[in-house]
Amino acid sequence: MSETLPPADGAQPAATASPHESIRQWLEGRFAEREPDGVYRAHMPVYGWDHPASEGGRLVRLSRAAQLLHALDDLRFTSFLDVGGAEGWLAWVVRERYGAEVVTCDLAVEANRRARELFDVPGVAVDADRLPFADDSFDVVLCSEVVEHVEDAVGLMLELRRVARVAVILSTEEVTNDPAILERFLQKRCGFPHAERNRFLPADLVQVFGKAPLILTQFITPTAAEPDVGDEPAARDWLESHVPTFRGLRGGGIVVRELLLPRGRQAEEHLGRAGRIDAVLQARIEARAYPERPDTGVDPSVLRRAVCPIDHGPLTLTGDGALVSAAGRRYPVVAGVPALHARPTFRPTRDGIEAAAVRAWPEDPARVTAVLALRDRLWMPDNLGRLDWDLGTPEARIGTSAAHELETREPPDGAGLHLRSTGGDPWLIGPAMPWRTGAVRGVALELRIHNPDFPVDAGEGQVFWLLEGQPDFVEARSKSFGVTNDGAWHRYEVLFDGHPQWPDDATLVCLRIDPVNGPAEVDLRRITLLR
């Protein structure tokens, strides 16, 4: 018997919404998208590399998939888990090509419903940093293009290792060899739904996944456009030239594999390079509207491995189809998909990461220390309940990103951000502001604007807002305000309540601040939400 999924993180205060919840709701909507003819709009190129009903960069995605298969190809395994597996395409390929028992999991219930609907792959809705599976549940655990998005990247990586028996495979494009580029990125990230919030040095991943992991490049950075629709020989040639033939990191993105069981490797590869390219090119289904499969309850391959995500204790299947822990926690099953989310009961903490790292490496305190340092570097405040950002403090500046025609004039200090507008449309995004709109009536900005070539009253600023589920900032969701161009500090209150695009009951994600509509020196000292 299926249940309706309750609102996630429902225990959060009424005035606020968790960023994690915002991401989940965004993904629920994304994996429910359909084309006008009813065909599901896929994340991966499930209908083939040249079909438009999936996201762009399809051959690059196939190149990455071929390299993920490369990391699998010499392993001995009979079970496979894809963490963040979207609509289950890669798990399906692994089942078809390697004969393994496969499970996919994703934050969104809708993603897992598509996996059952399209590929008959069992799925589980999870928080990736608190997986609801027993230790050593799967031979191979893979996680591709997820770690850059999550709140607790180190917790996620430790969880992958915990539930894997033979090997862990992880991929991300968010990797750089330049510490300065990394530092700039970490300072500017905003944290709005599904944005990249984590980036790594290769050495960071080596700290987590061992001193001698297998490292592969995802793809050779494209120098040519993807070929025309229908030209499969050209598509194969494109992949032949962009799927790397070497090991190590020398191009776009990284694939890293830690072998947990030394005898988990075999001498010969299952498919070989040509076979891997064939596998991803040929992995397509017909583009049509697929009916939902009958709800036959929780798949046995999931049921025998699933545990309570909070305490990792056993789960019992009740007569009405839900899963219940020994402590009485109830987890619904939606159209055959168990919703085993740990939040809001579980929240990642530094102490929790330290305890997990000590369990993973009880005799390697140096590794524990390095992993904790990585956690501290990636940590980003969720800003739950926060109303005021004093931009003179480094912590408050995390998540602010100057863009377009706004650049840094000098390093930020105790007086806030020192910027320069170089044109008529400068803007700054962030930080994350997870508040319910009914609890906020506007924002106050402490600004200083100076350009002696313009009149004192010539300038105008503008504030845009992004609400949960909306893809971008638009003019209709904005409010303009006059600014004084005299080089002195002024406080501007911009009120949203009463605006036709400011709803009574939605979730604010973040603001875009356009401080002035022309060239000028700009200083921003404080951002305050008005209750």
Image (cartoon, rainbow, N blue to C red):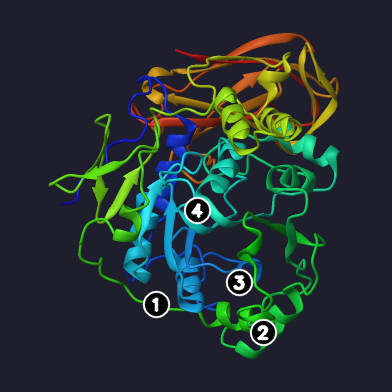
For this rendering, which residue is in front, 205 or 267?
A: 267
Q: How crowded is mark 1: few (under 14 residues within 10 Å), some or many (20 or more)?
A: some
Q: How far apart are marks 2 and 4 (CA)?
A: 26 Å
Q: Where is residue 474 in the image (x, y as percent from the top left)?
A: 52, 42
Residue drawn at (62%, 20%) of the image:
482
Mark 3 and mark 1 in contact? Answer it, CB < 8 Å.
Answer: no
Frontmost of labels 4 and 3 is 4
Residue that label 2 marks: 274
Q: How far apart are marks 4 and 3 (CA)?
A: 18 Å
Three-letter code, disc 2: Ala
Three-letter code, disc 3: Leu
Which quadrant of the figure contains the C terminus?
Answer: top left
Q: Where is residue 456 in the image (x, y as percent from the top left)?
A: 75, 16
Instruction: Indicate which disc, 3 or 1, sits on the residue closer to the N terminus.
Output: 3
Under circle 3, the secondary element is: helix
Q: How crowded is mark 3: few (under 14 residues within 10 Å), some or many (20 or more)?
A: many
Q: Position of residue 103 (x, y in %)?
A: 41, 60
Residue that label 1 marks: 287
For this rendering, which residue is in front, 327 or 48?
A: 327
Residue drawn at (51%, 78%) of the image:
97
Residue that label 3 marks: 62
Q: Is residue 314 above or below residue 230?
A: above
Residue that label 4 marks: 83
Three-letter code, disc 4: Val
